[in-house]
């Protein structure tokens, strides 16, 4: 009999760390309406192997996008591609992003990845750019014989920490966006791809994660930052001469600009939805619940077959109903599932009791209730009643703060309130008012 390794279980349940260990992976594509990873990979490897592609991925923060992108990375690497995956928020100040910031960070990450496999390029444009930035903005940096990745890292690190310096850098680089793009393509990407292909590689893929977390702050023309970056500046983001995948905010899927977004990129974003624990008609989705139970139990017993894990539920929970309660209250939100498990494990060693789970749920509920104002309650209950909304930016904060969840399956697309809030008396009162309208 395999004993429960508490330390391993605790670490594997950390909600802040996307999984990269395949033992913990549960494939939810069956209940989410399709395999997004297969679609993204097929577009690159089968449909457009000889020309650059730009694809978009969206979904709630914490819905499992990073986990799926790790799987995509592994699949593309197995197909012979050199894949550069990186988390953009490490280098970017997400409250204030320009296209030139994204391009610089991509150039840095790609060049650093290439240097790690022995491909070192020193584009002359960037050497001149570093010198010019150092002189013009009085940005202290060593530009003599510096590698591309190190030079850009110096710039991005300083600009992220200083609002004034970042503003000056934006003013300096924005008129040079075309030159920057041309240099990245001609002096970095094209030579790199040629060298990769000479080594037997199929090509180059850049996966830019966490851009879905950019703030909705207003940019030029009073445009929210997501629309400004991914619609107004789409032509520049898709001009890179390699395969690129960007994550984008889910609010764009409900924006009045959604049709324009599709036209700019040529297709709809791939959407990683919440796991639908109920159907659009309110019926319990047993397949989804089974997958969520497996997700939790895989963290506890990663080396057991799926068929054997569920036999160990009472080693992890005091009763199977406690695990079911955890899955239901999560609303099918991956990170919430793990956050509840993680919270319980901080209070109690397994088996986790229903009492402790309810304490964790109570704390989560109280934290959320403190954040919702009267206008948001009105919007929340209206959306939950209508099961949809479109084009109202006021709803974006409900999606961003995970008060409202979006679901899709074979029966359609709909939204619903976070189950933690649905159980509160204040929600029931607001919903009763809404039902009377």
Image (spheres, rainbow, N blue to C red):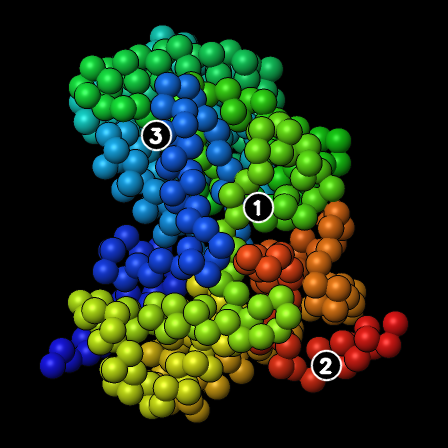
Q: Residue at x 42, y 32 (%)?
A: 43
- 18 vs 379, left or right, is left
Q: Nearer the viewer, mark 3 or mark 2?
A: 3
Is the Cβ of the residue at disc 1 closer than 8 Å to that at disc 2? no
Which callout, 3 or 2, points at the residue further toward the start of the chain?
3
Residue receiving disc 3: 45
In the rendered image, the vertical position of residue 107 relative to residue 375, given as above or below = above
Q: Which mark is residue 84?
A: none
Residue receiving disc 1: 249
In the rendered image, the vertical position of residue 187 relative to residue 41, given as above or below = above
Residue 245 falls in which quadrant of the image?
top left
Near-viewer residue (252 or 90): 252
Q: Residue at x 48, y 29 (%)?
A: 54
Alpha carbon distance from label 1 to label 3: 26 Å
The single residue placed furthest to the left in the displayed view is 1
Q: Residue at x 25, y 82 (%)?
A: 311
Near-viewer residue (127 or 193): 193
Q: Let me know if residue 244 appears in the view.
A: yes
Which callout, 1 or 2, points at the residue further toward the start of the chain?
1
Q: Nearer the viewer, mark 1 or mark 3?
A: 3
Residue 8 in percent (x, y) is at 22, 69
Residue 261 in percent (x, y) is at 64, 34
Element at label 1: loop
Is the Cβ of the residue at disc 1 closer than 8 Å to that at disc 3? no
Which callout, 1 or 3, points at the residue further toward the start of the chain?
3
Element at label 2: helix
- 121 vs 44, left or right, is left
The single residue placed furthest to the right in the displayed view is 437
Residue receiving disc 2: 428
Near-viewer residue (293 or 172): 293
| Mark 1 neighbour class, 10 Å CA radius: few under 14, some 14 to 19, many 20 or more | many
């Amino acid at each position: 009999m395999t004993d429960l390794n508490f330390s391993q279980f605790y670490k594997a349940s950390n909600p802040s760390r996307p999984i990269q260990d395949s033992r913990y992976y549960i494939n939810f594509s069956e209940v989410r309406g399709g395999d997004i990873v297969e679609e993204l990979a097929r577009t690159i490897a089968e449909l457009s192997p000889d020309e650059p592609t730009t694809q978009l991925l969206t979904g709630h923060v914490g819905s499992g996008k990073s986990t799926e992108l790790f799987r995509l990375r592994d699949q593309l690497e197995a197909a012979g591609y050199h894949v550069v995956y990186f988390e953009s928020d490490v280098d970017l100040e997400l409250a204030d992003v320009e296209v030139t910031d994204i391009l610089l960070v991509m150039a840095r990450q790609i060049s650093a990845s290439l240097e790690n496999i022995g491909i070192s390029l020193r584009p002359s444009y960037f050497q001149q750019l570093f010198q010019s930035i150092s002189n013009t903005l009085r940005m202290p940096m060593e530009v003599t014989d510096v590698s591309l990745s190190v030079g850009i890292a110096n710039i991005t690190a300083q600009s992220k920490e200083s609002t004034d310096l970042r503003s000056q850098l934006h003013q300096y680089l924005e008129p040079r966006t075309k030159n920057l793009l041309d240099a990245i393509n001609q002096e970095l990407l094209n030579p790199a791809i040629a060298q990769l292909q000479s080594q037997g590689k199929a090509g180059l893929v850049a996966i830019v994660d966490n851009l879905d977390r950019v703030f909705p702050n207003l940019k030029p023309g009073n445009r929210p930052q997501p629309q400004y970056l991914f619609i107004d500046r789409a032509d520049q983001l898709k001009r890179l001469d390699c395969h690129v995948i960007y994550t984008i905010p889910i609010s764009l899927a409900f924006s009045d600009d959604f049709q324009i977004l599709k036209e700019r990129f040529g297709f709809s974003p791939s959407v990683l939805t919440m796991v639908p624990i109920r159907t659009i008609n309110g019926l319990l989705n047993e397949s989804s619940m089974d997958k969520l139970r497996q997700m939790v139990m895989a963290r506890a017993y990663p080396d057991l077959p799926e068929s054997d894990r569920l036999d160990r539920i009472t080693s992890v929970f005091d009763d199977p109903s406690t695990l079911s309660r955890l899955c239901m209250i999560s609303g099918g939100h991956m990170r919430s599932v793990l956050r509840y498990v993680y919270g319980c494990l901080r209070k109690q060693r397994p088996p986790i009791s229903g009492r402790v789970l309810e304490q964790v749920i109570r704390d989560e509920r109280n934290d959320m209730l403190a954040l919702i104002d009267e206008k948001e309650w009105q919007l929340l209950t209206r959306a939950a009643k209508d099961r949809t909304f479109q084009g109202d930016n006021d709803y974006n904060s409900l999606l961003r703060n995970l008060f409202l969840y979006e679901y899709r399956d074979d029966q359609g697309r709909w939204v619903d309130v976070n189950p933690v809030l649905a159980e509160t008396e204040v929600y029931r009162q607001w919903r009763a008012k809404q039902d009377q309208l």
